[in-house]
Amino acid sequence: MTETVAQRHRVVIIGSGFGGLFAAKRLKNSGVNVTMISKTPHHLFQPLLYQVATGILSEGEIAPATREILRRNKSVRVVLGEVTAIDLDGHAVTSTAGGLQTVTPYDSLIVAAGATTSYFGHDEFATYAPGLKSIDDALDLRGRILSAYEFAELIDDPAAREEWMTFAVVGAGATGVEMAGQISELARRTLRHDFRSIDTRKTRIVLVDALNDVLGAFGTRLSAGAADQLEAIGVEVWLNEKVVAVDERGLTVEDKSGVQTRIPARTIVWAAGVKASSLTQTLADQSGAELDRGGRIAVAPDCTLPGHPEVFVIGDMMTLNDYPGVAQVAMQQGKYVATLIKRRVVGKSDGKPFHYFDKGSMATISRFKAVANVANGRLRFGGFIAWLMWLAIHVIYLVGFKNRLTTLLHWAVSFIGRGRSNRATTYGQMIDRAALDNAAMPDVAPPAEAARRPQPTRP
């Protein structure tokens, strides 16, 4: 069945992330009709996904329904669907959902479909090392993390138990650091009294990165301080180590001299890289625009696709002036292109090119500890003050009073106390995980064929 949607001055937005949502909000009362096409029915506050994965927050608190957010904007229609084709010459977008194909014509198109996890040419790693880009990813990881302790409780063999109680996080950027820090908090504070056969404080957490620093974008001083703080809470920091193999029982890393080391670990989190939505290839094939190594497409200074002034590409999908792939860029571009469309509709000139105002970046390390880089890097600091700033900024950008209130309550329970109110995982998730890992219980000995060098002593 095919449905054709036709509207007068039509703006189509692909994606309900930061860029798409802020564009839709800015277009309110602008005299245009908007169709937002998204493959999920929610707007995801992605910076807090790691807290869903570690049981602090529920998925509903960071992923409100897009229809609820935009319900007062009667000129916006929300359409569920994954975009399968964009016809630049015909000015139409094709999407599918549940076997229904929808063709949506446009006069202006905003492409804000975001990015996915990049495994740098090794997509086979995804089976055993999921990324953290969606609610599905976060719930999968929550099940993996919590079930690891359940299986460790059942096992008598010390070597096999250590495998289950070892967690590897690949990528020492903000997501990797935050994930490693929260696994440490979970093991050392929340779960410490909950098991009888295992001591969760003996959990091993390894943070691996091919580069030579932690949170490199925050500067040398904060980077070194973050590494020290991670090690203080029991996280092993392995830098200049490239991941060359991943399987159900661990990963293998290689240093710059070519020496390989095996890290036995039942739970692996991939936070090492991103790549733009595959829609950039669709746009490049029709427009001739260039793509970079991450699949991002080159756009004009006003965020338009070269040769197609009616098409805007924003957020993680575009490359312009080396702007970082962060939420603030997408938010500001969403507002900018919406304003530009409004000007065009009433016959005004486009105005100035897009300019990104860097409000700074922040990352948490553990309870009461964070790092902050503000004022274009002129102010860099860490510790408790940075952590309070992080709390305030994230509460401000959450959508809806209810979500802000419940998030604050959950943070109080987790950060002031020891509890985590969202530790639920299903038996089905645990069994599926065990089947995936080939973890038949009593056959849990580490693979004998893996050649290992002596484990290096880490500070």
Image: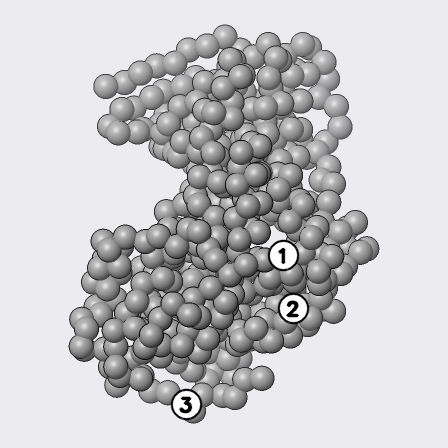
**What is the three-letter code of the residue carrying label 3?**
Arg
Q: Contact (CB < 8 A) between labels 2 and 1?
A: yes
User: Which residue ends up furthest to the right in the rendered image?
Assistant: 378
> What's the residue at 65%, 16% (across, down)?
342
CA neighbours of label 3 inside 10 A, class few (<14), some (14 to 19), many (20+): few
Where is 420 relative to 22, above or below?
Answer: below
Q: How crowded is mark 2: few (under 14 residues within 10 Å), some or many (20 or more)?
A: many
Badge 2 amino acid: Ala
Which x, y percent locates residue 432? 23, 57
Residue 10: x and y in percent read: 51, 14
Question: Would you say the residues marked 3 and 1 are in contact, meaning their CB atoms lie under 8 Å apart?
Answer: no
Q: Can residue 423 be seen in this view?
A: yes
What amino acid does circle 1 point to?
Ala
Residue 180 percent location from the top left of the image: 51, 65
Question: Contact (CB < 8 A) between labels 3 and 2?
Answer: no
Q: Which residue is located at x 44 percent, y 61 percent?
A: 270
SS class of the residue under badge 3? Answer: loop
* In the foreground, 197 or 131: 197
Cα distance in 3D space between marks 2 and 1:
10 Å
Please tell me whether mark 2 sits on a helix, a strand or a loop.
helix
| Residue pointed to by mark 1 | 363
Q: Mark 2 points at which residue?
A: 226
Does residue 454 lie above or below 51 as drawn? below
Say which label, 2 or 1, has the lower sequence index. 2
Q: Is residue 214 left or right of residue 279?
A: right
CA distance separating discs 3 and 2: 28 Å
Q: Residue 453 carries which label?
A: 3
Q: What residue is drawn where x is 45% and y is 18%? A: 77
In which quadrant will I find the N terminus? top left
